[in-house]
Amino acid sequence: MLRYSIRRLLAGLAVAAAVVTAAGTPTSAAPASDFELYANDVLVAPGGAPQPLTVRFSVEEPSLHATVTVDQSGVKGARVSKPIGDHCTQAGEILTCTLWNYPGDTGRTYMLDLTVMADGTGEIGQAGELEFTATTSNGLTSTYRSKVTLGEAVNLAADQELRLRAEPGDTLAPNLTVTNVGDKPVHGFVMEVNPQYALAPQRRYENCEYQPDDLESPFVCFFDDVLQPGTALRVPDDFALKVRADVWAPDEYHGTVHWMTPDEWQNQRQVLGPLGQKGTQGVLKLEPAAIAARAKQHPQADTDPYNSWTRLELIVTGGQRADVAAVGATLNATVGTTVPMTVGYINNGPAVISNGGDRTPYASATATIPKGTTVVKAATNCWRPPGSGNAGAAIYHCGGDGRRHAGESATYTFQLRIDTPGHLVGRVDMMLSRDADPVKVEDLNPANDTAEILVNGTTGGQGGGENGAADDGEGSLPITGTSTGLIAGLGGLLLVAGLVGFLLARRRRTNFVA
């Protein structure tokens, strides 16, 4: 199971490479803003496992299909494997793949997963270039080059799983080790820790690079030790991870620790981009100390990249939840005018929400638009339920806003036309639910999960914004509203009906071809 999960992690890292502009030589016949093409560099070892190669490109205009050609005539000692299926054909040094849109998709993003493997020829240290050309059915084209390098075969291994148990705010000292199970010395190595949101480094070392504390991002540490065959090194006891004080509890979190060679890290840096600043709290040293060996002569690549990962499993104990309140709106406006209406929800804490834990819930909201008004423009991250037609709907489901700490809110601004005079009433229903599970998770105060939308439509005079204030035209209305439980039953049903759409909307629409 771990090996399968690591394969998915490796593929995910290659996917993430598409969002950075890393080393490589792009040449495009179309403007870069209209057509972005990317493929990662690859380091392979004779006798080693296939390495992931991901080709990804985005176009501004939708297209029915796209064609990708891979010219590997510039690479010696390694081959690009033809994917399973009939969407790719091989003709000499040229691999050609056709990518089709899914029905109803906009066709803006395409991705092709390939692998590269050493073929037993070539010399250690030599490098060549793959050339990629992508052409869409509506005539856009772009090219890109990535590098393939043959490295010396080494083999780093780590414990497959490490289970931790703690309460919010606790500090843990994970026992992380790396072993050289190959027959050649490994000259320096890199430890990449992907701790998920729940775990943060307690100290920031001078030989490690870190992202800001509030990001769910990896940190990386660099070591100059030479690890001889059959020996192991471990991190010291003062290397500690702290469980963030605001995590939902009880909960479960999963992360990884990956050991790799410095040469492999240079390729992975393309994926991650600059991590951030180095620490200032001393140098992290492994123990026991390694014995110096012969000088390194060639780039080094791990023959089995799957056994150098440790899966971190954190069980957070205790009891800590959050009070998440719906936020409604009050509008005063003249019939016939269109005004902004801002609704949403706010996390009153103490626990964080939507942070990726197995049991941490995600927040969503359903806005029931007052009768006598029409939505001219829906808010970002909001959508109509299926079958509601193209006209302004009476119900909108909203979500996919990411992590919210205590005191943080999510807002949705609609452009609302007032069609009928009088006091018009709608509602906002907030719902917490877990990923792929449309069952409501109760927060600390269910009484404020519903808030009213109040519209006072007048037939003459100056229409105002929220609470009678003049509309500033920017949609930045004060977020107020009266919570009510009298109409909570209907809102709960609407939330369950719309949650499937919310879960789908949280995922990027991408065409994958493996």
Image (tube, rainbow, N blue to C red):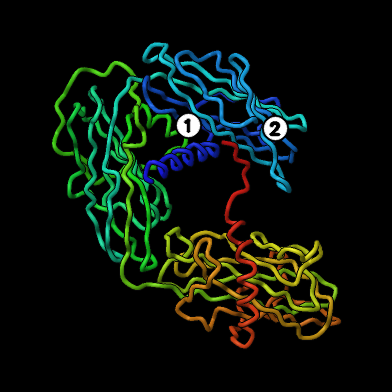
Of 340 and 260, nearer the camera is 260
User: Residue 197, percent across and down?
Assistant: 40, 56
Q: Nearer the viewer, residue 170 or 460?
A: 170
Give the percent coordinates (x, y) of residue 481: 61, 80
Tell me if I can see residue 169 in this picture. Answer: yes
Number of numbered callouts drawn:
2
374 lies left or right of 218: right
Q: Is residue 260 above or below residue 438?
A: above
x and y percentages locating residue 99 in the rendered image:
66, 34
Q: On screen, 315 above or below 42?
A: below
The kind of secondary structure element at disc 1 is: strand
| Residue beneath the point at 62% across and 73% down | 478
Circle nearer the N terminus (2, 1): 1
Q: Residue 181: x and y, percent?
A: 24, 30
Residue 36, above or below 203: above
Q: Quadrant of residue 314?
A: bottom left
Checking the image for residue 66, the label placed there is 2
Label 1, residues with CA under 10 Å away: few <14, some 14-19, many ≥20: many
Amino acid type at image mark 2: Ala
Q: On the image, numbered disc 1 is attached to which residue?
A: 52
Residue at x-position 55% and y-position 67%: 438
